[in-house]
Structure formats: C-alpha cells, structure tokens
Amino acid sequence: MNSLPACRYEFDVIVVGAGHAGTEAAAAAARLGAKVALLTGNLDTVGQMSCNPAIGGVAKGHVVREIDALGGLMGQAIDATGIQFRMLNQRKGPAMHSPRAQADKKAYQFDIKRRIEETENLSLCQELVEDLIAEEVQGTSYIRGVRVRGGAEFRAPAVVLTTGTFLQAIMHTGEAKTAGGRAGEGTTSGISQALLRLGFRVERFKTGTPPRLLSRSIDYSQTERQPGDEDPQPFSFLTGKLTQEQLPCWITYTNQQVHDLIRENLHRAPMYSGQIRTCGPRYCPSIEDKIVRFADKTQHQLFLEPEGRFTQEVYVNGISTSLPRDVQDAILRLIPGLQHAQIMRYGYAVEYDFCPPDQLFPTLETKSIQGLYFAGQINGTTGYEEAGGQGLIAGANAALKLLGRPALIPRRDEAYLGVLVDDLVTRGVDEPYRLFTSRAEFRLMLRQDNADRRLTPLGHQLGMISNERWQAFQTKENDIARAKELLEAKRVEQQPASKYLRRPEVTWDEMKQRIPELQEFSRTVAEQVEYDIKYEGYVVRQTQQVERQLRLSTKRLPADFPYETIPSLRTEAKQKLTKIKPASLDQASRISGITPSDLAVLLAYLEQPHRRKTDA
Amino acid sequence: MLHWNTDDTICAIASGTAAALRGIVRLSGPQAIAIGEKLTRSLANSPRRLASESLSPKAAAIEYRLCEIDLGNRLGWVEGESYWWRTTKSYTGQPSVEFHLLGSLPLLEALLSQCCRFGARMAQPGEFTLRAFLAGRMDLSQAEAVLGVINARGEFELHRALDQLAGGLAKPVAKIRTDLIHALAHLEAGLDFVEEDIEFISAAELENLLQHSLGQIQTLQQQIETRNVSFGSSKIVLVGRPNAGKSSLFNALISQDRAIVSDQRGTTRDYVAATLGHDNLDVELVDTAGLDDSLYSEIDVESQIRTKNQMQQAALVVHVVDAACEVDDELAFIKASTDSIDHARRFIVVNKLDVVNDDVIERWKIKLTEIAANPSERAYVFVSTRTMRGIRELKNQLVERVEALTSDEGLGMLPTTAQRCRDSLQRCATALEGAIQMTRGIGMHEELVAAEIRLAMEELGWIAGEVYTDDLLDRIFSQFCIGK
C-alpha cells in the first residue's frame, strides 16, 4: 500500500453499505446530480435480501409504492424479479389494499446491482469502511469522509451510513456464537468505535431468521397451496403489466408436539438462557417466543416460500429461531410435510449495534455532526422497505443540502415515509421499528394506489424524477380530471353520475355500462376516480385535521432554541425538547410527555421577537 | 394537542363564574363576529361608537349594541349588551365580541353552548392571555406570570373538575376508552395482520362492543345534564317560608338592591343570585322563592321545583325563619323541608330579631340546640335585617362554612370543563353512532369503522386531558400472536 495522500478519492456523497437503504440512498443522491461513492464490503451481496424472500405487505407495500413514486429502485426491481404477486386486504377498503410479492432473491439483488451500475454519477466500490473522519470547526463538527481497510480515504462533505446488522454483530444458534452480521459473513467494529468516539449513543437490538429447507425434501401434498393473484398488480407506476409465470407458496402448521419439544429445550434458546439480553421485535417473534407468550395456542401457521426460480432453497416463514441445530432438526420431524425436510441453512438470531434515532433530524442527518446521515437498521428499524425508504430520504437530503435546495421531509399526511421518519426522530424506538397502517393517523389518505399523486409532484419539484415518469404522471392526472368531468356532466338515476357512484354498492363496471365514454379510461385511472369519490367524506374530515397540524408546522423551532432558559417551561419539557430538538411546534406536539400547555408556552416565546405593534 | 391554535375562535366566561350582577361571555378569533351576528338581534337601530376617532382611536374601534341574545331553545332570547371589536384592535388582537348579560351561571353557560354550536370552542385556561400576549398587548414579563401558571393550574383544575362532574368523569371515561381500545385493537389487528392465522372480531361482536360504549357515553351525558354543573360550587341558598325575610336578608348581605324586596307574600317567584365578595373567595348567594306546602298555581309549582334544585346544588342551605312565628311549627317545617340535606350543609337564621322580646329569643335558642346535629356547634344566628344587627357576624360565619365545605373542590373551572366535556361526549357519541351504522352496512369497511372509533377515542382523550400514544400496538401484541 502506498503511504498517505496517494489514495484519496473525492466525492460529494459517500454511502456506506449497499443493502436496501444504501442502494436507494446512493441512487437518490446520484439522480440529484451528486457525485456518489457507494462502498460495500462485498460486491456480491449488493441489494441482498438477508431474511425473507418477499417485498411489500400491509404498510410496507405502501412504502414501496412511495419509494417508486419518488423515483426509487425497489418497485421496478421487484416487478422485474417477482415470482408471486398478491394484493393483500382486498376485501377491505382501498386504503388497506397492500401489494406483496415473493422475489427471486438472487434475481432481485442482481437487478438492483445492475440498476446501481447503470446509474450516472454513481461509483460502486468494494471497500470495507473502518473509520469515520470528522472535523470540528469553531465548535461545529463536520463529516469529512471515511477511511477504508488498507488506509485509503474517501472524502466527501456528506456521508450516509447504512450498515444494517453488521455493527459488532453476533449470531446465535443455540449455545453457538459466531461473529457476523449475516450467515457466512463478517462484522465491522471500526464504525461502532468511531460512532462512540464521536459521541453517539449506541445500543443493541436483536433480530432472527428461520431455517431454509431443500425443496425436494418437502412433501407438499401435506400442505395447503397458496397461489398468486390471477390478475397481478405491479409495484412500480412505470410497469405496465406483469407477465411472468407465478409460483405458489405453501402453508403448513406447527402442533402441540412441536410446542412441547420447544418447551423442553427452552433452556437452550439464547433468548431464554440469558445469552441474549437485547430486545427483539414483538411483531416478528421467534417460534420459542410465540410458544411462551401464547401458551394456549395449539398451532402456528408456517409459510413455505421459494427463494427463487433456479434454486431449491425454501424459506420457512413463521419459525424464526435461535434454538440449537439438533432442536431445529427435531422440530421439522414433527411438522406435516416437513418430516423429511433437509435444512440447508439453520435459523439464527443476530445481535447488532444501532444508534437511537432521536439523535437525528427529520432529514436523517445527525444532530451532532453536520453532513452525517443514518438510514436503515442503524436507526433501529427492521424491514427492507423501511430501510429503502430511509435510504432514499437520507441520500436525497445529503445531495439536496449540498445543492442548497429545500429538504425532502414528507409529512405524516403525505406518506408512510413521513410517518416512519417522524416516528423515529420524534419518539425514538424501544424495539426494532416496523411500519403498520395503524401508526398513520391519516391512513385513509395514504393509499397505495395514490402514492404517485401524493409524492411524484414533490419529487419533481426537488428534481428527483425522470422525464419519463413525469410525463406518465401528467397523462394520468389529465385522464383522471377528464373522467371526473364526465361524471359531473352525466346524470344517472336523476342525479349527477359522480353522486351516484358514491353509493357503496355501485361499481365502476356498472358506471361503464351506463356511461360508455368511461370505457376509454385505464383501470388505474378508474381506481383513482372511484376511490376519490367514495372516500371523499373521510378525506375532507382528515384534511381538516391536517390543516390544523400544518399551521403548527409553520411555527419553526431553531435547533439551538434555548429551552433551558424559559422559566415557565416544566423541567420534563425542557429536557425532552432539548434532547429531541423538534423542527417545529407540530413535531414538538408529538413528543411523548409534551403537553398542550407546554406548546402554548413555546408558542409565546417563539412569537415574541416577531411581535408586531398593532396597538395604536 | 392542537387546541392552542390561534386560528380557532374561542369563548369563555370572562366575569368569573360565581354569580354576579353582570356576567360576561367573551368570544375571540376569526369567526367571532360571524358567530356573534348569528346569536344576536339588535334592539337599538344602529350601532354606537363608544368614542369618536379623534378622541380615542382605541375606543372608536369598539361598537356597542343593546341587543337580544339567543340562548337556545330552552331559554330563548334574553336582553343584554354587546361590545364588538371588528378589527384587530381588541385585547387578543383578533376580532372579538363581548356579551354582557345577567350574571347567572345557567344563562352564561347556555350562551357558551350557543357559541360552541356555531363553531367556537371553549378556551383553555390562559388562552385569552396568550393571544393578548401574541398580539403585543403585554410584554413578556407581564405574560410570564400567566404562562407560568398555565401548566400547574390547567392540570390541577382539570382533575378537580373531572372528579366532581357527574360524580367523577375521569374513571368512567378511562373505562370506556379501555373498551374502545379493545374493540379497535381487534379491528386494527385484522387490518395490519391480514396474513396471520388469527380469528378476528365479527361484525356482530363489534357492534355489541360499540353499543355498550355508546350506552355508557349516553349515561354520562345524562348525568352531566341532571347533576347541574354548578354542583360543588360555593353556593349559598337562602330558603324559608314566604315572607320570612329572605330577600331582605339577601340584600342586607350583599348590600345592594338586587333582589326585589316587598312585604307581599311570595314576591320572589324565581331565584336571584349575587356574589358575596369576601377576601379571596367569591361565594354565590342565591335567593329563592318561598317554600310552601300550599300551592297557588302552576307557576308556583315550578318555582318550588327550582328552589329544591337550588338546595340540592348548594354548598350551604340557609333556612330563614321569622322570629315572630310559632317556634315548634317553624322547626317542624325546617325539618320537613330540609330533611334531605346533609346536616353539615344546613344553617338557620332567625330573622326579625327586632320584633320579639328576649323570652322568645331564649326559647328559640333552646329549641335550636335540641335539633342541632352537633350540640357543641352553633348552627344558627339571630339577625335583624331592619337594624342590620348580626348581619356582619352572619356573613363571616357563612363564608367560613362555605370555605370549609368547598376547600377541596376546584372552583371556577367547573362550568368551563363541563361545557367542554359535553361537547366532547356529543362528538364521541356521534362518532360511535357512525361506527355502529357502518358495522351494519353491507361490505363493512373496517378501516372506516376504525377511523370513527379513533375519533371517539380522541374526544375521550380531550375530556381526560391526556394524550395517549402507542398503547394500541401494546394491546395488539399482547392479545394476538403476531408475526411470521
């Protein structure tokens, strides 16, 4: 290796880690014109799905649509490589419809990798980052870049960390402990040490993954078949029609014997033996957790999900475990269809470092070091979709700040991405964070089908949207407007057609028969018109709530607002506000323990210097 | 959380809630004028300026109008005065209206209800001051004093008031909220975890749960209506036979010619009220129609009922007797008419001391001691409203007793809180009715039902003055085995 300054590379934005967060971050920054370096420890695992071979689901599918509406990668990649597509919750209202797809794991990651490689302004490099370079200038800390194994330096005014589960990672299978963030891979400790040195709070979470089985050793005749939708719907607003052949998944169940076996071996499970003390997600419990916490349940559902078209590997969704290998083997012997199943990879739990996200601004920039951004599991979240969404926001904001443009901070009423980021930075996390639709107070407005209408104009305004996407969007909006005009003009059953369509039992198909001119409109356009009309009353009501919040969000709170010096603020409020540094009164109102009276006091002080003399 | 918005139009009683000669309701915010117009009709032909522009620009911004004010179906139109600030030159820097009317709490509350009905909401404690401050009407050091107490006062008074309303609202509201979370958790689990192997709630079960909660809300609504909001206030009610001299005593106590006093039996057909100012405590003094077992007419029946209501709500019931009447008869009557009143809340005033001799007084003393709940405590006073003898002592005694009886109770906040609770309960009930409707409809959309339940819960949160976060997910995860 050469000695110093020879190996020094200059970029605008450096993204560390090329998983779901890192790839979206790098692509978003590059789309905005920044010169980006995407550094990964292993070029062969770019965009890898470490856990289940699926994208989407309730709330998560919404996020993928939002990422796509902002020009992200995930939607197009899954449309290209999905092997089964289902729209969940179809029997409920449109706000609940949620796309989910099984992916061909390898195809997906190569598709992502290819998209990254083809992106202008983006350099994908295999480098292991070992240290962060920061500098303090007149009391303010700035990120300067990263140092990689071998001593080379990548310099940039903005760095996005998307390190996943790789920080000081330990994998557990029964009593066996291995250092590493994913089966067969290593871990990094340099970044954790750098974060501690730079003054970040670092804590630990745990997550788990189930065993993978050999397909031809499974007796599918003892299981239930779960096919994809007959009329599969794509994730990306740019995808026309999905034409690939779909593969089924299969369902089987645990039973009392399995549960007894697990109970007998609980003392060997790291979560119960005391070997793991950190917190895992409640909504994604290990099988041992399920059996302890819901002792009266006699069976648990298991999904057998193919990992791809060209592999025999099958993911067993529902049986995430860190029990020892011999217990994992024994469990399978008792499950219908899996009696002779061969484990290709054993399940394991992984513990890793994360930085509590209340250390971030809503741009995902850290409060203490300018230009340093975090996205994905380092923020205490789980899920590919949550990671991808944060990556897009962090990457875009890193570039937007360098360009001197306004930040990308979707509001809670605009996007699940807004809910996600606001929850993280305002409330912090006490278990690995995952999105649910119940976290969104404006759920009825945040439909998966209107993600483009909610976000594409914003993306266009910020310069993140390709011309192709913008043209397609405008055409669609035009069609929607024309269809609505038509419905206003025509009469059905002595009333405007738009009013008639409001009835719950009236369908678009019926409208098409009554008004033949409607036949020219595509299904996506019809959906927008119909849902807009049917949800109108609720949307109006929620809009009123939104407007209230908006007024509060215009009351900006500077990051250096001197909360400590306000005598009439309660001590608890002072502490919390000083810690969270809310960007506006609106965000302050959502900090737990902040009362309306605290807000009133803040408002008084906030408005104080701008007071107008209106008294004659 | 967002109730501090300065774009809302707010209203409150601005004159203190103890009854006074004059009661003031203040209305301020962008909609103040519009709401005010809906609630009034002018008596005088044209609005009057208080001063000419050249004399005082500040006063010139105020319009004065004699008007009738609409207090709703039950009370109808009453006469009053109003002051209008159509520009920003008001106390709060926003369009404002002040209504001045008879200082009776029920009237003022009715007016508040009307304001809310037309789009205003009840002000939070200190909210007018905050707006005044934001409008530059006072400097920070002046505002600081008020801001400093907003936190402490708001919370303290809220809890006090909730405890008193309808026999304690906080607990039943918390219970209903728990029930609703239970229902919502089932719904939400069904929405968010559709792929899970969980038996979620049926429409019929859900409807049952919601009906149950709605029933409880309606019970609370009734309780608030029947238990007058003034329950727990520092109210002294004067009762007694017609012509025992209650109104004379009332006037002597407040030293104002407020009640109409005459020597014709039964002059006071309804009740009149005034504030008995004493140090820091405002005590409301209420004069009532005479209690009588002989009934004259239907109007009198109503007066009697009103009198009995007043007695139920009073902190202290003062029975006024004529010293010249037959002692045993009078005592029997006192016993009969105030039997339902807790003895600690009963006090006897023997009036017309000047028309009887010492023997009579002695006989009164003996008999009164006999019937006293606690012989060591003297629960009576002799006075003469003509010579004013004993009036000062009586006044001191009354205030002392009321202070003792009500010291634990949050005064003043009560009516405001009651109004807010009424509003919230009504909205809560409407939301639940909507939810129930939808559970019956074809193709029930759970997310819409959930939206209504969330709305209902938000209103309950307002009543309890608490903001809840995240316990829905706790519920879901503790109830269902979620996760693949």
Image (cartoon, coloured by chain):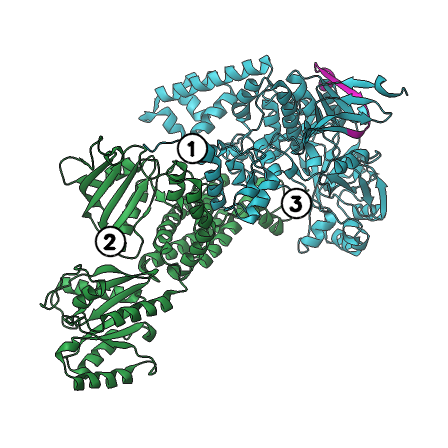
Chain colours: A cyan, B green
Element marked by disc 1:
loop
Query: Is A110 displayed left or right of B56 in the figure?
Result: right
Mark 2 or 3, closer to the camera: 2
Quarter of the image that includes the N terminus of chain A: top right
Q: Position of residue B32 (x, y in %)?
A: 30, 37
Is A123 rendered above or below residue A330? above
Q: Confirm whether circles 2 and 1 share one chain.
A: no
Mark 3 or 1, closer to the camera: 1
Whether residues under marks 2 and 1 lie with C-beta atoms below 8 angstroms apart, the answer is: no
Q: Residue at x 48, y 31 (%)?
A: A554
Element marked by disc 2:
loop
Give me the disc on residue A278: none
Number of numbered discs visible in the structure rendering: 3
In three-dimensional space, the C-alpha distance between marks 3 and 1, rounded to whole angstroms, equals 41 Å
Q: Residue at x 42, y 58 (%)?
A: B160
Q: Amino acid at mark 1?
A: Arg
Asked whether B306 or A475 is in front, the reply is B306
Along the polypeptide, which appears first: circle 3 or circle 1? 3
Is A401 rendered above or below residue B479? above
Provide the residue designation for mark 2: B103
In three-dimensional space, the C-alpha distance between marks 2 and 3, rounded to whole angstroms, equals 54 Å
Give me the disc on residue A430: 3
